[in-house]
Every structure is written in C-alpha cells, then in structure tokens.
Image: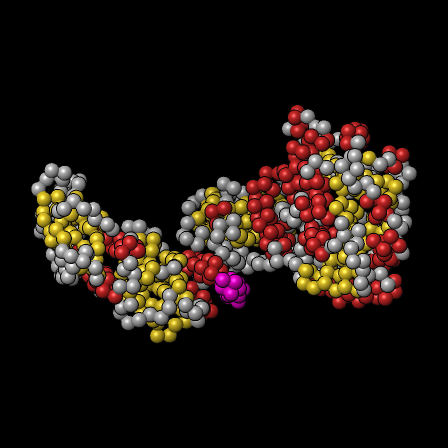
Amino acid sequence: MLEAAGPAPGAVTALRLAPGVAAVLFDGAAPGAETRIARADGTPIAPLATLRLGRADGGARTIWIMRLGEASAEFAISAAAFGPEERLRLDPDLAAGDPLALVAGLDGRGRLALLSAALNAWPGAFRLGRSRVYAATLGLIARSLQPRAAAAIVACRPFEGLAIIEATLSSAIGRLLSAHVVGSEGLSRLKADAALGLAGPRRRLAILADHGATAPGDLLVLIGETGAAVRPLEEGEKAASLAGWWTKRRFDPALAGLVVRGLSARSEAGRRAVLELQARAPLPARAVAAGPARPMAVIDLALSLEGGLLAGGFLDDPDRLVAGLDHLLPDGGSAALETRWHRFSGRYAEEEGGATRAVTGFVAFLPEAAKVGPLLQPRFRLRLASGTALPLVPRPQPTDPAAMRAAALRAVPVQNATAALLAEALHPALAEIQKRAVAPIAVERAVRFGTGAEAPLVSLVVPLYRVLDFLRFQFAAFATDTTLRQHGEIVYVLDSPDQAEEAEHLLGGLFRLYRMPVTLAVLNGNGGFARASNAGADLARGRLLGLVNSDVIPIEPGWALRLAERIGGKQNVGAVGPKLLFEDGALQHAGLYFERDARGTWLNHHYHKGLPAGWAAANRPRLVPAVTGACLLTTRSLFREVGGFTEDYVIGDYEDSDLCLKIRATGRTIGYEPRVALYHLERRSIRRHADYMRGIASRYNSWLHGERWDAEIRALMGETAAEAVRPVLRKRAAAAAAERSAA
C-alpha cells in the first residue's frame, strides 16, 4: 500500500537517495516521447543512470540518478527536442523527500523495473551497497509494495556462512533472477541458488545462499522475470540440522535437487554431505509392474554426471501402451528419453537369480541433465497413451568412479553395442567417468630396494595388477642379465594397492636373494594400465624407456640393449618391439597391424599369431604399423613428447597402438626386432578385472581408437575410400600385403 502520490503530470521532483546521490523524477512525457536532462550551462552530467517506467494511468515516468555537486546546479528537463523545458535547481543539501514517490502511480511492470534497478544497477554505479541511508530508503520502498507479507525463515544452516531460506511464494513472479537482503547495515546480493517446490498457486521457495547472521528488520527481496516478492527475513527459532531438513524435503525433487546441486558445487565437504544424505535416507525405489493393460518398466541405470545423465532400463509393452519416458529435471522441466534412446532385445529378472523374461532394453544420454550435482536417485515418469503418468525411481546409484564405470559397461550387451549407441549414449558418459576415475590416481609411496646405477641407460617400467604369480620368474630373468644390472633400472608399479604388503614382501625377498636394485611404486588406487605405466615413466631416470607387462619373461640376457640398437638410425625408428612367444613356443607377436571387423571397426591384430616361432616371415627385422605394449622400447623424451599413454581407454586396451600412432605422427617409424624374443603369457592380468571381462570395454576401446585414428589407419593399411564406407573382413593375404607396404 502506497502512502505517497506520484508527481503531478508535468511536474519535476527531486529527492535524496543517499548522501551525495539524488533521484530526479519527471512525469511530463507522453507515452513514447523522448525525455532529456541537461545542465543549464551545457556541461555534461556524469555519472547518470536513466530509467523509463510506465504509469498506471498510461503515462510515463523518467527517473535520473546522479551525484550531487559541491555547489548548487540548475538543470533543464524537456519531454521532446523542441518541447517546453522544466527548470530544476539541485542543492548539495537536497532534502531526503518521500522515497515512496519513486514508485507511486507506477504500473506493475514499472514497479518491478524500478526495484530491480535499485537493487542491481544503482548500488554498483553509485557505490550505494554499504550506505545505511540508501538501505533504509530501499527498505521503505520494498515494504510498501508488500506490507503484510509472511516472513521468510532461515530453516537450516548446513555450514558456517551458508543458509537454506524458505518462504511461500506466488508462482506469478516467474523464474528467480536475483535475491537480495536489505538491512540496517546496507544491502547485499546473495550468492544463491533457488528452487520452487511442487506445483501450485503458492509454492514453497527454498534458497541456498551465502548468508551470515540475520539482523532484526532485514528484508529478503526477490526479483523474478515477471514479478517481485518482499519478505521479512527471520532466523528460525529451531533451525533444522541438514539431515533433519533433508528428511522432510527429500521427496520434493526441486528442493532436494537444489541442495544436491548447490552444496556439491560449493565444496568437497558439501559434495560428501549430499552423498551421505542420499545414502542414509534414500527414496523408495519405484518400478511399474506388468499387469492387465499395463506395461512393465524399470530404470536400473541413472548416472548423474557433469555433462548429463546416462539412463538405462527395460520395458515390456506388448500392447503398445507407452507414449514416452521422461527424466524429471530438478528445475521442474523434463527431458524425453524416447527421442535419444537406443533400444535392444534383452532379458530381465525381477529378483536376482530368479526367472527372466524377454524385454526391450534401452540406454540414453541426456545432456539436458548437466550440472545437477551427484543425484543418486534421479526421477523418471512413464507416460501412457491414456495420459496417465507413472513414477519411476531407481535404486541408489553408485558414486565411486570405478563402480560407475562398471555399471555403464554392463548396461548394454556387447552384441548390441553399435557405433551409434557408443557415440551417442555411452561415450559422453564413459569419457567423463574415466577422467574422474584416473584424475586422483598417483604414486602414494615408492619403496626402493638397494641403490641402482646413478645414470641408467634404460628404465624398465612394469605395471602390476592382481597377478603376481610370474614376478619371481620375471625378476630372476632381469637379475641374471648383467647388462641390466650395469645399465638398467627396474620400476614396478602396483595398480592394486590392497596388495601392497604382499608385493613389498615379495620384492624385498627377491632383492635379498639376487641383490638386484628395484623400485616398487604403490598407487593410491586402481587407475588402469595407462595410468600405472605413465606413473612409472615419471619415476624413470633412464634415457631409454622399456614398457613391459608383468607376464613377459625374457629368454636371453642382453635383450633390452639389442632392442635399443634399433632406435633412431636411417629409418628414424621411434619405438621398437620384440618377437613374443606363447608358453608353448608359438608366435604371439611379430608386429601389429589393423583390420576391420564385420561392423567396420578397426581391430588390432598380430602378424603370424599362432604360427611356429621359426616362421620365416616373422624372423625378418622390418618396419610395422605398430607393436604391442606388452614389451615396447622407446626413448623417455619421446614418450613424454607424445604425452605418454593416452588414459581415456577404459581399464586397459588399445593404449599401445594409440602410442605407436602418436609416435608415427611425429614423423618417426615403428620397428619390429625378431632377434630379441621373450615369452608372453597373454592377458593374464586383465582376466582378473571383472569389469573388463563382463562388460564391453574392449568393444568401446576399439571404437574410440578407430574414431580417433581412422584416417591415419586407412592410409597406413592402404585402404581406399570405397572400402572405408563399408564393413569388410580381410583375409590373411591382406595382412601380408600390409606387412609388405609397412616394410
């Protein structure tokens, strides 16, 4: 309710907003007419803020905000270029006047615009934020707009300096643009996130804001797209704990989403807090059970990521009753899955170990759900053709990156993992999850047994994961190699830190037995083959870097230096690999080449695999497209130059050929040296990785590798453009032809 009337039409009014700052009001302009203000002597006015507002009577009001000078000044105001002028004298001691004149007579949009400018624009332009006089003026105006408003309550203080403020609010103000506190000490714009609760004419508003102690008389002023709200701000008599607040509000998706998003974005402590809240007080999981004229639907995958949501589940809809499936966004919107999902045939068991039924599986990635924070139970809605909407809530989802990765890898049967599905659904999620999984992995401690060469020529880096069975044999072969003793260093990197005590005990015993210096680097978590190898390379001191699997056993001493002889030279070899043999003596590796599978995906293949070790074509030193990372020698400087192993291949696969292709991109070549032979008990470690064996990691990695290097591989393998557009199955003759071209 307003007590003051606005200026009479044609009148000019001036009042003091704060010491040294005046507001000039002019209501003389007709709608659409231009208004001007100038000093009578023609000198410019600076700074000056201008606001043009609509009046309830159809007219217009212009308000100018300016600094008062040290001396009196006269101004000329006109409503048109050649219209009559009004004269106004402003003195340094201008009276405060009635601030309600600013809003009196304005229409609704005019009041909103004035309040928004007074809170957002004028404080910065005229340094009014800490002015008590300006705050009192603004408080008087704000209270006049909504004199009998219910209070906003500080309902919870999750952390020091942070508050959850609640108020009831009309839906008419629209999306919240800014929130402010007007108090006796000045005014402040809250760094805040806000959410409106469940729909209705009056809805609960929750604001998560950086806000200290509330003083008596403070006002909360909210500026929305289509309205404003003014609420007295009070501390709750019994502010709830964060856990208590969550228990009451977690069923409202908007309010729960506000806290998850806001707290997790502010600090690591906040992120851990919201994970704990969701885990301790989960929502009941909800599925749609099949029945008469009713489909079956379940969401069993719903991973909230920074880039969006990876969702998956199963449907059984024989009567075609399903119209669509939505993810309910915390801001009240929704994202349709059916416009993005990839479907496949599958089987679903309602109980673990129970009978299965034929269903349609689906998976989709929704970028609309980006940056919502770590929601453990995103909500969904099944839409039926009748218009009925049925809620779906998954069980709490994993938060550990390794567990999230495992869930994503098991979401789709390998036979259904098409290139489109990988590109559009799984890759956006797996890329982020893999980065998150690898980022914190580092060497927690390095244990050195003995003192090695001060300046080793070659450093051998050996990742260890689970399988330590062959360590005794490998270490014995290293220790009996006099060239390694004199010119080498051995760095083992343990990628399964729960085995640290066992590995340290084993290597300590081997050191005491052979007196061969060795370093054990223990990682703080499982980062995969690439991360472990890169961590070991960072510790290495040799000019040459040998990357060796833990299941590779040298046959003869001197092998590392013989490989080193191939580095550089006329062929500019950047990396070299040896002949590798199965335990029965058959060829396991004689260089690596690329071949498309039936889907058209490039796969890695080994030349002459399974043939006798003496196979003539495998006993010729030559250049090859790539070599396996099971045993690869390069220079440490080149390894660093190309960025080491690429770490976005999940768990471990295709990093070796990726490294070779990066080396080739520098203008160097890849060599194969058959005069050096070692045993390779292939893939013994990776078989212990359940996520690799059960999921589609290899399929994903091969797709990612092909997407990254398709043009280079096509050129390397001599594939024509016509062949590139269709899946092909090459025969061994094609491999032989590629071998000849590489040489």
Residue 18: name its quadrant.
bottom left
Image x and y of residue 549, in percent: 78, 51
Q: Quadrant of the N terminus?
A: bottom left
Q: Which residue is drawn at 68% across and 40% down?
A: 662
Residue 614: name its quadrant.
top right
Which SS does the magenta portion mostly show? helix
Q: Residue at x 81, y 58 (%)?
A: 453
Q: Nearer the viewer, residue 741 or 434?
A: 741
Q: Residue at x 51, y 46 (%)?
A: 366
Q: In this view, does 719 lie above or below 503?
A: above
Q: Give the range drawn in magenta.
A: 267-281
Image x and y of residue 329, in percent: 45, 52
Q: Nearer the viewer, residue 227 or 355?
A: 227
Please say whether residue 223 is visible from this viewpoint.
no
Q: Is residue 655 above or below residue 237?
A: above
Q: In which quarter of the image is the C terminus?
A: top right
Image x and y of residue 161, in percent: 41, 68
Q: Nearer the viewer, residue 629 or 431?
A: 629
Horizontal side of residue 520 vs 314, given as left or right: right
Horizontal side of residue 709 vs 129, given as left or right: right
